[in-house]
Amino acid sequence: MKMKSVLAVLLVLIASILPDLIIHSPYLTLGKIIVLVIAVVLFLIIRSLRSLWKLPVILLTINAAFWMSDFIRNTFWWKNLFGGFGFFSGVAGSVFVKVLGIIPVAAVLLLLMKNPKACFLSPGDLTVRAEKITWLGIRGDRIQWRKLAVISGLLIMIGTVLLSMITTTGFGKLSGFDRFITYLPVILLLAVVNSFCEGLVFRSAIMAPIKDLFPKLLVTLMPALFFGIAHYQGIPGGFLGAALSGVLGYYMSLSMYETRGFLSGWIIHVMQDVAIFSTLVLMG
C-alpha cells in the first residue's frame, strides 16, 4: 500500500504544472507523456501495481488535453476571437478552451469507470450529513452537505473577493459597477461552465480511479494537490494562492467523496468563480 501511495502521488505531481514551474523546456510535455505511458505499461505488467493503471491513463489524457488547449490558443482563429484585452477576451477565451479540453477527459473517464456515478459525474446525494471536520469546527453528522455547501460557498466567496483585492487588484476605486451589471449574465454563465470544467479535470478525474484503492484522506488530498499547484499562476496566485487553492480543493474533494457526486463541490466552486470574475470586472 505504501509503494502504491508514493507512486500515485508522484504521478500526480509529474502530471501537474509543477515540472513546468521548475523546468522550462519545449520538450517537457512530451517528457511527461512518455513517463505516463511507461507507467501505464509497467502497472499492467506488474501484478501488485495493476490496480493503479487507470490513474496514469487519465493523467495522460489530461496532459493531452492541456497540450491541445495550448495548441488552440496559438491558432489564428482563436487569437482573432479572444486575442484582445479585457474581461471577455481573457476569461471567455480561457473557458472556451477548457470546454474543448474536458471532452476527451470525460470520454476516457466514462470509458474507464463504466458509469457516471463511479467517476463522480453524477450529482450525488446532498442529503448526506458531513462527517467531522475538526480543522473547521464542524461536528460530525450534524449538517447536510446541501446546506453546508451553500454556507461555505458564500463564506469562500467573500474571502476570495478580499484576497483578490489584497494580492492582485488592490483596493482602488470601484468604478466598474455599470460594467458589472452589463457583464453579470456572462459572469454567471462563465462561472458555472468554468467550475464544472475544473471540477471534472482536477477532482472527478483524479478521485475516480483511486477512490477504492486508498484511504479517504489520500483520495481527497491528491486532487487537492493537483488543484493547488495548478493555481500557482491563478488569481490569487503564487505560493499563497496555490496553498489556499489546495485547501479549497481538499474541502471540495471531501464534499464530493462523502456525497459521491460532483454537485456539492460545484456549488462551492461556482460561488468562488463568481467572486473572482466579478472582482476582475469591478476593478477593471
Image: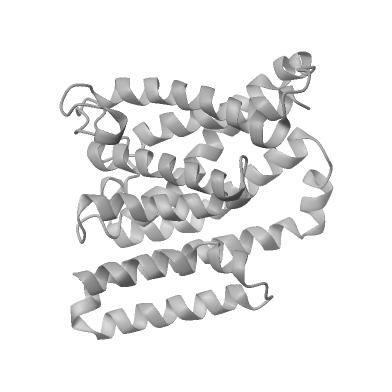
Identity of the residue furthest to the left in this view: 141
Picture colour scheme: one colour
Eyeballing the image, is 167 above or below 179?
Answer: below
Which corner quadrant holds the N terminus?
bottom left
Eyeballing the image, is 158 above or below 16?
Answer: above
Q: Position of residue 66 (x, y in %)?
A: 58, 61
Q: Residue at x 56, y 44 (%)?
A: 241
Q: Residue at x 80, y 17 (%)?
A: 175
Q: Position of residue 260 (x, y in %)?
A: 25, 41
Q: Position of residue 223 (x, y in %)?
A: 39, 52
Describe residue 31's horizontal placement relative to residue 266 as left or right. Answer: right
Which corner quadrant holds the C terminus?
top right
**What number of labels is visible?**
0
Q: Nearer the viewer, residue 266 or 236?
A: 236
Q: Residue at x 50, y 81 (%)?
A: 34
Question: Residue 120's quadrant in the figure?
Answer: top left
Q: Nearer the viewer, residue 100 or 30?
A: 30
The answer to whether residue 66 of the structure is visible from this angle is: yes
Q: Residue at x 48, y 66 (%)?
A: 15
Q: Nearer the viewer, residue 88 or 272?
A: 272
Describe residue 283's horizontal placement relative to residue 119 as left or right. Answer: right
The answer to whether residue 189 of the structure is visible from this angle is: no
Eyeballing the image, is 12 above or below 144?
Answer: below
Question: Residue 20's quadrant in the figure?
Answer: bottom right
Q: Nearer the viewer, residue 11 or 83?
A: 11
